[in-house]
Image (spheres, rainbow, N blue to C red):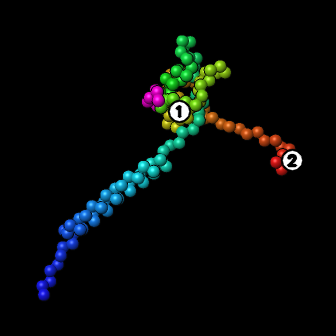
Amino acid sequence: MTNTKMNFSSSPLYLVLLFTVSLNSLLAWGMISEKSMSKFAVPSSLHIVYTAKRPSNEKPEAFYIQILASVLGSNEAARKALVYSFKNSMNGFAANLTPNQVKKISAQPGVLHVARSVTYNLQTGGKENNNV
């Protein structure tokens, strides 16, 4: 009886198996990397952007969109980030911005100050409210 060794690494079955495992690994890595990238995305938070007086012939929201678009790259991205346009009480707007975007928008002409929005909750000190 002759001892014939079969070279498994050159068999078609091995090549198909190797291809399948490689393809599945690439697909799984692609799905995992997309999910994991969202974990590393820098979260945005609400900021109040104080601006100089806008030109009298320009509507407030259009002026604020223009400022945001110069940092975010498009009017569509600016509209998504814009939360509120102040029209009467002050010149400015509220927008969701990342720390890097805050730095960039702070350097824009017409921007006076950018502050992170903070919510304060009032608490009463009375004992009668403890059992609510």
- Return the x and y of residue 80 as percentages of the image width and height: 51, 32
- Return the x and y of residue 42 as percentages of the image width and height: 50, 43
Residue pictured at 27% horizontal, 61% vertical: 19
Q: Is residue 31 above or below residue 74?
A: below
Q: How many marks?
A: 2
Quadrant in the rendering for residue 82: top right
Mark 2 vs mark 1: which is more N-terminal? 1
Q: CA distance from mark 2 to mark 1?
A: 42 Å
Quadrant in the rendering for residue 94: top right
- Return the x and y of residue 83 as percentages of the image width and height: 58, 31
Residue 100 visible somewhere in the drawing: yes
Magenta-colored span: 70-76
Residue pictured at 45% horizontal, 51% vertical: 36
Q: Quadrant of the N terminus?
A: bottom left
Residue pictured at 47% horizontal, 47% vertical: 38
Q: Do labels 2 and 1 touch, CB within 8 Å? A: no
Q: Which residue was labeled with disc 1?
A: 81
- Say if the magenta span includes residue 71: yes
- Return the x and y of residue 118 as percentages of the image width and height: 65, 36
Closest to the observer, 17 or 108: 17
**Residue kind at label 2, given as amino acid type:** Lys
Count neighbours of disc 1 (C-alpha within 10 A) and say few if under 14, some if 14 to 19, many if 20 or more.
Answer: many
Q: Is residue 61 above or below residue 16?
A: above
- Say if the magenta span includes residue 95: no
Residue pictured at 42% horizontal, 49% vertical: 34
Count neighbours of disc 2 (C-alpha within 10 A) and say few if under 14, some if 14 to 19, many if 20 or more.
Answer: few
Mark 1: secondary structure: helix
**Residue kind at label 1, given as amino acid type:** Ala
Q: Please, what is the dominant secondary structure of the magenta stretch?
A: helix
Q: Which residue was labeled with disc 2?
A: 127
